[in-house]
Image (cartoon, grey):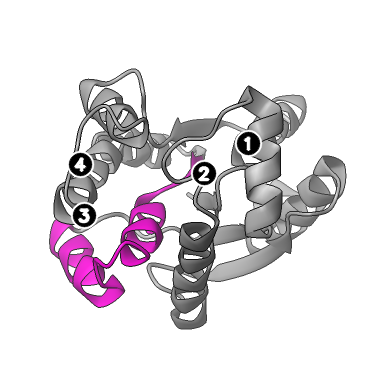
């Protein structure tokens, strides 16, 4: 069964679009499973949150491994959902770890080798919600009136976007498509559905 990932900079709209897809699937009686990374309810996610808020100092390698473990925690759920005939939507995946860590000088190629060794399930479709670093920062500030280590660093966000572009150009881990995340949430939702329907005919 289909496995779809939503990716993008912080504030790109992954959570919003995941919720809209959830409503769509419920309305159309389509069995689905949603997974989200990072999982801040888990000790691993909590440690990552501490890092983002400068409560703990971690190296780039440590953060890569931490985020990888966070995603690994969701793999049994993903595999079970697919085996049960559900469409699985991931609000971020290991592709986020690759992009964000590449931007922090943990080379994409090295990250890909490690991911391949761990045999992560490959998504059928990876949707990149494309927004500018400026939009990212503004949306996150409007949302919570404060920014974490990643969200407040405009130059870093630029590098992250460049890293995503590298992944998109090589279709790393699966087929990538780009959606303009600057549009209204409903326009973005319809664009996402268009891509899902174009690949998964059973879900029209």
Instruction: Name the residue tied to disc 3.
Output: 60
Q: Quadrant of residue 41?
A: top left
Residue positioned most to the top = 41
Mark 1–mark 2 distance (CA, rounded to whole Å): 7 Å
Callout 3 secondary element: helix
- Check contact, mark 1 vs mark 3: CB within 8 A: no
The label number, if any, that marks residue 66 in the structure image: 4
Say whether disc 4 or disc 1 marks the residue closer to the N-terminus: 4
Instruction: Name the residue tied to disc 2.
Output: 151
Say whether disc 2 or disc 3 marks the residue closer to the N-terminus: 3
Q: Residue 157, can we see it?
A: yes
Callout 2 secondary element: loop
Q: Residue 2, can we see it?
A: no
Say whether disc 1 or disc 3 marks the residue closer to the N-terminus: 3
Callout 4 secondary element: helix
From the viewer's perspective, is residue 122 above or below residue 109?
Answer: above
Mark 2–mark 3 distance (CA, rounded to whole Å): 17 Å
Instruction: Name the residue tied to disc 1.
Output: 140
Specify whether 168 is left or right of 45: right
Mark 1–mark 3 distance (CA, rounded to whole Å): 23 Å
The magenta stretch is 89-118
Mark 3–mark 4 distance (CA, rounded to whole Å): 10 Å
Q: Main secondary structure of the magenta part?
A: helix
Within-10-Å neighbours for mark 3: few <14, some 14–19, many 20+: some
From the viewer's perspective, is residue 110 above or below residue 135?
Answer: below
């Amino acid at each position: 069964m289909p496995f779809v990932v939503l990716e993008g900079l912080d504030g790109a709209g992954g959570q919003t679009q995941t919720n809209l897809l959830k409503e769509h699937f419920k309305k159309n009686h389509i069995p689905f499973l949603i997974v989200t990374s990072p999982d801040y309810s888990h000790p691993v996610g909590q440690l990552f949150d501490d890092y983002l808020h400068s409560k703990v100092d971690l190296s780039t390698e440590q953060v890569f491994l931490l985020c990888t473990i966070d995603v690994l925690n969701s793999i049994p759920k993903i595999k079970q959902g697919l085996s049960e005939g559900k469409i699985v939507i991931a609000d971020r995946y290991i592709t986020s770890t690759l992009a964000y860590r590449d931007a922090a000088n943990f080379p994409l190629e090295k990250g890909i080798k490690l991911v391949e060794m761990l045999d992560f399930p490959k998504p059928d479709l990876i949707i990149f919600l494309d927004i500018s670093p400026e939009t990212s920062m503004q949306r996150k500030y409007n949302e919570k009136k404060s920014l974490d280590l990643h969200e407040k660093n405009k130059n870093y966000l630029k590098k992250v976007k460049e890293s995503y572009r590298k992944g998109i150009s090589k279709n790393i881990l699966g087929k990538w498509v780009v959606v303009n995340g600057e549009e209204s949430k409903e326009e973005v939702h319809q664009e996402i559905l268009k891509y899902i329907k174009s690949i998964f005919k059973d879900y029209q």
